Image (cartoon, rainbow, N blue to C red):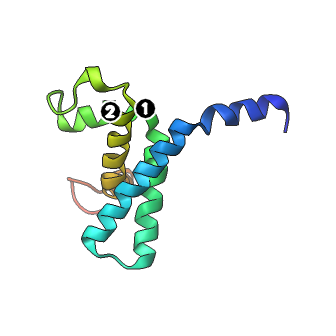
Amino acid sequence: MSENDLGMWSQVLTEKGAVLAFFGALGGAVRSATLRTTWRESLRIIFIGSATAFGLGEVSPTILRWIFGEAAIPESASTAVGFIAAMAFIVGLIAVVLVEYLIERSQGGGRDGPAA
């Protein structure tokens, strides 16, 4: 690996990214505990919540604003670290449903009926 490659990774793997991944995993853990899933399903839910919250990063308030509406998520709070962490928790909470929905839609399912 060259020095430029390490620079790219250091920009991606930041402390803020770790906070987002942690709160996404916490949201996934709350979901799996609420649904009383098996330990394997819990690991899957926690991993998907963590990875989705990390991947969406600071874009999550914009996406959640689109889902929940402008009144639920104010524009002015979008840059505060605590607010971003709360959004990562919510993303972790709904990540499995969101990912499964997007997979179903991409396979031709969704509101129009089941996938063929």
- Front in this rendered view, residue 80 or 65: 80
Q: Would you call the spot at circle 2 few (<14 residues within 10 Å), some (14-19), or many (20 or more)?
A: many
Q: Quadrant of residue 107?
A: bottom left
| Residue 46 pos. (x, y %) | 43, 62
The residue at the far left in this view is 71
Marks 1/2 in contact by CB < 8 Å: the verdict is yes
On-image quarter of the N terminus? top right
Compared to 48, does 33 lie above or below?
Answer: below
Residue at image mark 2: 61
Residue furthest out toward the right: 2
Query: Within 10 Å of the Cα at label 1, are there few (<14), some (14-19), or many (20+) other Cα atoms?
Result: many
Q: Establish if 40 lies above or below 64.
A: below
Q: Amino acid at mark 1?
A: Glu
Q: Which residue is mark 1?
A: 58
Give residue 64's position: percent from left, percent from top. Answer: 28, 37
- Describe the element under mark 2 as helix, strand or loop: helix
Residue at (40% x, 32% y) in the render: 81
Residue 57 figure quarter: top left
Query: In the image, residue 52 lies at what x, y percent?
Result: 44, 48
- Residue located 34% across and 48% down the image: 89
Residue 37 place in picture, x, y as percent: 33, 76
Along the horizontal axis of the image, is 36 left or right of 43? left
